[in-house]
Each structure stands twice: as C-alpha cells, then as structure tokens.
Amino acid sequence: MLWHFATFTEKFMKAKIILYTSVSLILFFTQSCHLKKGILKFEASQDEISTTADMHVFLQTHPHPTIALRASFFGINDTSYNPNNYIYYILEKELINQGFTVKDMVLFNELTKKTKADNFQKLSDITGVDLILDLTNINTEIAFATDRFYTLKGEERILNNYNINRLGAIIEYKLIDVHTANTVGTYTFYYTPCADANAQDDCHCLLGYKDGLDKIYPQINFCHKRAKPDTEQIDDQTLENFAQESIQSMLADWRK
C-alpha cells in the first residue's frame, strides 16, 4: 500500500509540473503576442547659424532696421493666393513682434522695378530698406532613418537589416545688407522628427511590436490602424511652429 501511495505522489507531482509548465508557456506566448508600443527617437540635426561681425555691429547701432522679407522661390511675389503664403506671414509677424520695420512685399517689388537689380545703394535709397532676408528654401521631405526603437521603459531594441523612416524639414535663409550689397548671414534650420522628450506623446513616433516573436509593425502608429507614417507629410501646425522657432533663433543670434 505504501508503494501505491508513493506512485500516486510521483504521478501527482509530475502532473503538477506539467500544469505549471503549460500555464507558464501560455502566459509567455500570450504576452509575446500582445501588441506593444515602441518609441522612435531620431538624433537631432545641428542648425547652421552664421552672422558676420559687421552685422552684429550694424544692429547695435540700428536696433530697429527696415527689412524686406523675400520668398520668391515660393512664388510669393504679389497678393494672389498661394498655399505657402501662411509661412511668409508667420515670419513677417515675428519680425514685426521683434521690433523690425517690415517693408510691404508688393510695394517693395514695385519699387525694385525702378532700379537695377545690381545697384543695391540705389535700391536702399528708393525703398528705405536696410536689410533683405531671403527665404531661400523650405523642404518638408527630408528623410530620417533609424534601425532602432525604444520600449516604454527605455530599453533599446536594434533591428536587423531594417530601417524605419520619418519625414523632417529644412528651412534656409540668406541675409543681405542693402547698403553694402554683402551677404551678412546664412542660416539653415532643421526639423528632426521624434527628437524631443515628448516623442512618446506623438503617435507618429510610435510603432507596434511584439516581444518574443521579434516582430515590428511600422504601419501601426496608434493614430489610426492603417497608415503610412514613413511617407506622411509634416502637418501644418508643426511646420508653422518650426518656421516661427527658426526665425526666433536667427533673431536671437543677430542680437548677441
């Protein structure tokens, strides 16, 4: 009888081990198959800001100069409708808020027709403009790529032979002293997607992944199930903020 009891105990323990193992495996695969949020982080590109010493001296003696803002590459040469006009007006408003006298674009263009394009001194006399700020380029399709993402706990995950893409932007300016016809400043500013500490609050910086199965789902960005975040354009509000911040950074450098 003792032998039968020992056999029963042994079978019971084996059954218990099998049960615990099965439950553990079920929990593991259930958790592994659960879709989780991963965070993308791109290294921010360094802005390129260059203002000449002569420009700094000029602004010390002329703290509120008259400036013309040009954006001819946008097709902004008159008052007709252009989908990019709002960027121009954001920049114009910021210049005015910072104490600059901004020459009306249409009036400036009319006055420049009365003088030769290469005669800057005459242009200054006719228009009363001290500086010309050229908005020379805006590109909202700058590709950023990364082969890694981070869990919500901050753990880095590196992908094998796979890159995740998002679109950033670049905005460039050139500053001309009308009195001397010299370029006194060049500026390049970058908008890097998912570069700040709030990336986990931006659904375009999220992607789905599953532990254990070593799978990612870059098309799931938790904004909507079916999406192509790698080709989505920068939204208008983000672009407006970027343009405003770029000119604020430039003006801060002018007044150093």
Image (tube, helix red, strand yellow):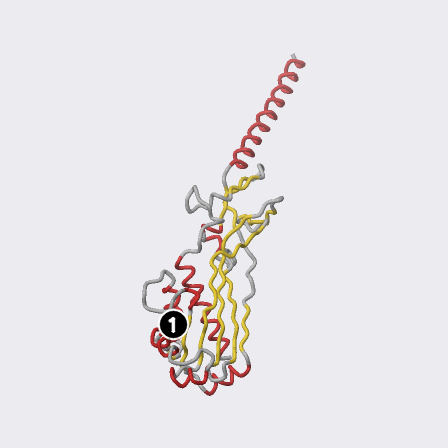
Q: Residue furthest bottom?
A: 61
Q: In which quarter of the image is residue 101?
A: bottom left
Q: In which quarter of the image is residue 237?
A: bottom left
Of residues 1 and 71, which is closer to you in this image?
A: 71
242 on left or right of 85: right
Q: Specify the amino acid type for callout 1.
A: Glu
Q: Is residue 252 above or below residue 236?
A: below
Q: Is residue 103 above or below residue 18?
A: below
Please report the residue visible at 48 percent of the width from the left and 43 percent of the height from the top: 219
The secondary structure type at the circle numbered 1 is: helix
The quadrant the N terminus occupies is top right
**Residue pointed to by mark 1:** 92
45 on left or right of 251: right
Q: In this view, does 184 lie above or below 40?
A: below
Please report the residue visible at 34 percent of the width from the left and 73 percent of the height from the top: 106
Please report the residue visible at 35 percent of the width from the left and 62 percent of the height from the top: 82
The x, y position of residue 226, in whole percent, is 43, 42
Q: In this view, does 224 lie above or below 167?
A: above
